[in-house]
Amino acid sequence: MNRIMPRSGIMDIAPYQGGAARVAGVEDAVKLSSNENPFGPSPRAIEAMRDLAPQSHRYPSSDHAPLRAALGAAHGLEPGRIICGAGSDEIISLLCRAYAGPGDEVLFTEHGFSMYRISAQAVGARPVEVTERERVTDVDALLAGCTPRTRLVFIANPNNPTGTMIGEEEVARLAEGIPAQALLVLDGAYAEYVEGFDGGASLVSGRGNVVMTRSFSKLYGLGGLRIGWAYAPEAVIDVLNRLRGPFNVSSVALAAAQAALADVEYTEHCRAENARWRGWLSEALAEIGVPSDESRANFILARFGSRAEAEACDLHLQSRGLIVRRVAGYGLPAALRITIGDESACRRIAVAIREFRETGGEWSA
Ligand SMILES: Cc1ncc(COP(=O)(O)O)c(C=O)c1O
């Protein structure tokens, strides 16, 4: 028998659960469980992928300079303070590897994105969860949760899976109040869905202790390619560049992301459709007694009377070929997270939940 063991703490990690993609026996199921763009990538991004496919034997650029320049121009940021990763997940993981380890604490909120906990545990740091106020990030609770061991504070704004967000002044108060040895990470995976919101970039520019992460997986519809980026102080970029793999982002992903970024008309269309159907769906559900908080992202968190009711509704939706996300693992057992699909998907969800409410009997247990 060998004695090969992983580092202590690794086996305590509960592996990330992705959204289900299939329902047994249903051919044309609609996947509304992973906050993907229902319209897919921009046609310009698809063309860029096709153009690059024959060059796939070549290694990609290792400094990602063309994409960083394009991101800098699109968002008014310094390209030298941008880093690209295999999804923003990779950047979250790099931040934990760089700034936290055994004896350190990584803070996030009660219903925060699960990769904060996993990435903290992966480096042997202690994950620390602080309460939210009615499913909204609570800056006072985060500040009260900081200790001399806190190295990283993660918030997603808008947050997943609640869809809620806090204002710029609150974020600035958090950046100002955290201890000197801590870095604030503003996860902007859904920032593009908020009209006129810079994701916290201006705060990064004005301070040395804030990082903003962004994703091409949501509004840009490139989740399958794995590409994200971050804007950070130069010193942080220098640290992360020492840790990341030299070819961490594929050439196809780099080219597709650049083309997607340039297709402003397409992203505006996707943003507008999302806002329209998000409003429509949350109202339609509220009318039948299924409330949700005002979401600023591409999903809503539908709240039911109990865990039993949420689970029964999920089974009913599955029977109709509609796959949504259970969020008990996020401390929200009585809720279901529903990605905003296209018009037809939203109408099907509303009809199916109405049917469930009308025929599902008493679920107030
Ligand atoms: C809040 C949040 N941050 C980060 C990510 C990771 O996104 P990416 O696909 O860029 O790794 C997600 C994905 O669902 C998310 O919801």
Image (cartoon, rainbow, N blue to C red):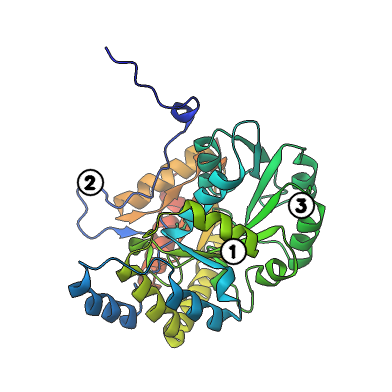
Q: Position of residue 261 (x, y in %)?
A: 45, 79
Pick the front one: 159 or 53 = 53
Residue 357 vertical position relative to residue 228 in the rendered view, above or below: above
Q: Nearer the viewer, mark 3 or mark 2?
A: 3
| Residue assigned mark 3 | 139
Residue 138, percent across and down?
Answer: 74, 50
**Callout 1: SS:** loop
Asked which quadrant contains residue 120, the reply is top right
Can you tell which mark lies on residue 295?
Answer: 1
* Residue behind label 3 places its C-beta within 8 angstroms of ligand 1: no
Disc 3 on helix, strand or loop? helix
- Is residue 187 visible in the rendered structure shown here? no
Distance (Cα) linking label 3 and label 2: 43 Å
Tell me the quadrant of the picture where the C terminus can be found. Answer: top right
Crowding around mark 2 (Cα neighbors within 10 Å: few <14, some 14 to 19, many 20+) is few
Cβ of mark 2 under 8 Å from ligand 1: the answer is no
Is 37 placed above or below 331 here? below
Q: Which of the two residues, 62 or 113, is positioned nearer the viewer here?
A: 62
Circle 1 packing at 10 Å, graded few (<14), some (14-19), many (20+), is many
**Which residue type does callout 1 highlight?**
Ser
Q: Image point 29% across, 55% down: which residue?
A: 321
Q: Which residue is mark 2?
A: 24
| Residue at x-position 32% and y-position 68% | 60
Q: Quadrant of the N terminus?
A: top left
N-terminal-most mark, 3 or 2: 2
